[in-house]
Amino acid sequence: MAPERHKNFIDGEWVEPSTGEYFENRNPACWEERIGLWPRSGPEDVERAVGAAVGAFERWRKMPAPARGAMIKRAGDLLGERKEGIARAATREMGKILLETRGDVQEGIDTAYYAASEGRRLFGHTVPSELPDKWAMSYRRPIGVCGIVTPFNFPMAIPTWKIFPALLCGNTVVFKPAADVPHTATLLVEILAEAGIAPGVINLVHGAGSEVGRALVEHPRVPVISFTGSTETGRRIGETCGRMHKRLSLEMGGKNAQIVMPDADMELAQDGVLWGAFGTTGQRCTATSRLLLHQDIEDEFLSALVERVRRLRLGDGLEPGTQMGPLINAAALEKVERYVEIAHEEGEILCGGRRACDADLARGFFFEPTVVRGVRAASRLATEEIFGPVLSVMTFRDFEEAVRMNNEVRYGLSSSVYTRDTRIAFRAMTELDTGITYINAPTIGAEAHLPFGGVKETGNGHREGGWEVYSFYTETKVVYVEYSGRLQRAQIDNY
């Protein structure tokens, strides 16, 4: 049976791409399985979507923010009602286990409810004027069309992090999801339309980043871009947006470290690194890519950890008992293999290090969870983002050295320290040069109501989530009301 053809969503209608071309969406756990066909769109489709978003902006921005919030609340309700079906669809096209995609959808639900409440809290400031009979205040207003470009690894959570706040603030959206996960994006936009979002306010254009993403970033009528993806792509987007004076939020790479001190709860620390390094098959910007062990505990800790890693069960994420799914595609698998070749030169492979050879697993992009010991601080394994199930183990003599090792990479997203020493914990909060630090927890696990993001080459200073993202999607306008009936000159007549 021929796979189902899906469409773009532009100006409230599901429409064929102008190119007439489609790409296949396949299951990374079993590449023979075709999920469907999605539009291989082009610049003309982006032009049409941006036109619809521009046309809808004036109407949408004038709707009271609490009313916009009520629609997003309804979208959250629908996500809750359909959570299991969406999670299964996401696992089928992305690969991570059902436990994780349920969490992915739940994050979308949480983000919807948080956004709905912000519709009544888009605060400005009222402050005293320095002159008599004069009122001074600020308020926040929407900017315009937001171009939203998202990755494959959190096909529901990351789009909702961006889209819900953008809509709540009164902006309109053109959404370009990763080509690896078009089905989950389609389900999200179906829900937004059902929740009552007006035509033109949310638009979905599928396709390649080199075509659709580029056209969206370069469009002169799209003043806001929010991108999550690689640092290299983000750098190119930043150059374009800087030249065109666009507002830009970049969320990019990570090379996150878990530090284990000798006084730590060792079993808890092993739980943390298993989840942080091999959850989502290591395909998280917050994944635990480096394990920093105090030299006094290295042998004992690694012996127990490797035994647990070898017992991890690989398989289809929809199957009960599966603990780690496949990589997203062939290119990702080949990239991990290249880094394992480097590992043979830069360290000692304690377990894993090869494609899964079981007959069923050979049908997908499975790679064994890999632990590499003896990695040097300045080596490629210690400094470059792999985005796969490869854990680089390094040792340190004292906490000061661990901090230096954590901070010397070009990324600064997440960090973690396991210790029972309160002094070390509080030093970690201030000395680890990352946007997020966990104490006695892995490097993954962000919550929807707090800001998310990093420093250095991880981002450009903006944050997803929490209260800070609402500042990104709004402009501050200051208003002065003079009711003295005479000319008053600030900084002149009051002195």
Image (spheres, rainbow, N blue to C red):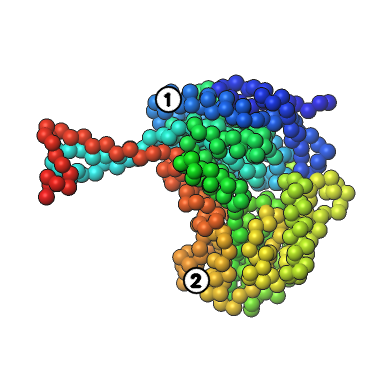
- Of badges 2 and 1, nearer the viewer stands 1
- Quarter of the image holding residue 79? top right
Whether label 2 touches label 1, CB < 8 Å: no
Q: Which residue is mark 2?
A: 424
Above or below, comparing residue 25 to residue 428 in the picture: above
Residue at the extreme front of the image, as rendered: 243
Q: Which residue is rendered at x = 59% and y = 52% of the image?
A: 231
Q: Residue 337: x and y, percent?
A: 77, 57
Q: Which residue is rendered at x = 48% and y = 24% of the image?
A: 56
Type of amino acid at the residue the image marks with label 2: Ile
> Which mark is on residue 58?
1
Type of amino acid at the residue the image marks with label 1: Glu
Q: Residue 14: x and y, percent?
A: 63, 22
The crowd level at tag 1 (other Cα within 10 Å; few <14, some 14-19, many 20+) is some
- Quarter of the image holding residue 137? top left
Above or below, comparing residue 350 to residue 197 in the picture: below
Q: Which residue is rendered at x = 73% and y = 39% of the image?
A: 92
Instruction: Indicate the secondary structure of the residue bearing disc 1.
Output: helix
Q: Residue 313: x and y, percent?
A: 77, 54
Above or below, comparing residue 87 to residue 432 in the picture: above
Q: CA distance from mark 2 to mark 1?
A: 53 Å
Q: Which residue is rendered at x = 81% and y = 26% of the image?
A: 2
Q: Is residue 284 left or right of residue 344?
A: left
For residue 198, say whether it is visible.
yes
